[in-house]
Each structure stands twice: as structure tokens, then as C-alpha cells.
Image: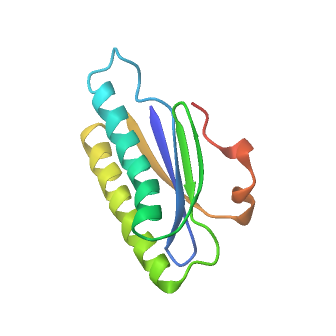
Amino acid sequence: MTTITVYTLDSGMIRGYEAGGHAGGKRIRGYDLVCCAVSALTQTGVNALCAVAGVTPDVQVRDGYLRCILPEGMSDQQQGDAQIILRTIMTGLTDIQKIYPNLIRIQQKEWRQADAYDESSALRA
């Protein structure tokens, strides 16, 4: 199963996301489709934050894992653009979860500054 953790602030704004795991193995119907879709959306989020919002998020990538956290000190315009991008990515992931609920799980977690440095809480592939 692929697990997506969405980090949110008290204000409801999204601070970032983390995706880890594989959708269940090739023996499960939809595996390739779900893995590709999640990878495409999460990587597109990173690329769009850079290209559209003009911000460079903190990104960690390895096999079956991607973590994307917004930087501190963004302008109001960058913050607004980033939120549109992140909410769009989350909408796509939620749509996938509705179709394949046994292959993807989305959870929300309140952002703590400690999360910026605590890789031990990161999802493992």
C-alpha cells in the first residue's frame, strides 16, 4: 500500500507531503497504474512548485519514497501559488484513493517544526 501523509498548519495551509511504499505488488490489479499515477502527481508537485510558484522545496527522493516540504520565508504570492499546486496534487491523489482504496491511503498530520529534521518518522519503502 502507498501511504501519503499531508502536513498541514493550524491555519489549514499545506506545508508539504510525503509518499511512501508501493501499491501492493504486481499481483494486485491496478498496481502499475496506481504507482505510476502517485509518482507522476507527487513529482509534478515538486516540479510545479519550482517552475510555477518559484520556490525550492526541501525534497527527499529514493525508491518508493518522496518527501516535499515548503521552505520558510516565501512571499504571499509564492505561498498562494504553492497552496493551489499542493491542493491540486492532493485532489488528484484523493481521486485515486476513491477508485483504489486498498492501494492508497491518505492521512493528515499537523506539521511540527521537529518534522523538518525528524527522518525517523519518515515512511519507509
The total of numbered circles placed on residues is 0
Q: Residue at x 56, y 49 (%)?
A: 67
Residue 77 vs residue 68: left or right? left
Residue 26 vs residue 8: left or right? left
Residue 60 vs residue 50: left or right? right
Residue 75 can be seen, yes or no? yes
Where does residue 62 sit, x and y in percent of width and height? 58, 35
Nearest the camera: 1 or 61?
61
The quarter of the picture where the N terminus appears is top left
Of all residues shown, which one is farthest toward the bottom?
76
Q: Which residue is drawn at 29% across and 44% down?
A: 96
Q: Which residue is drawn at 36% across and 48% down?
A: 41
Where does residue 4 sit, x and y in percent of width and height? 48, 46
Nearest the camera: 51 or 90?
51
Q: Residue at x 40, y 19 (%)?
A: 25
The quarter of the picture where the C terminus appears is top right
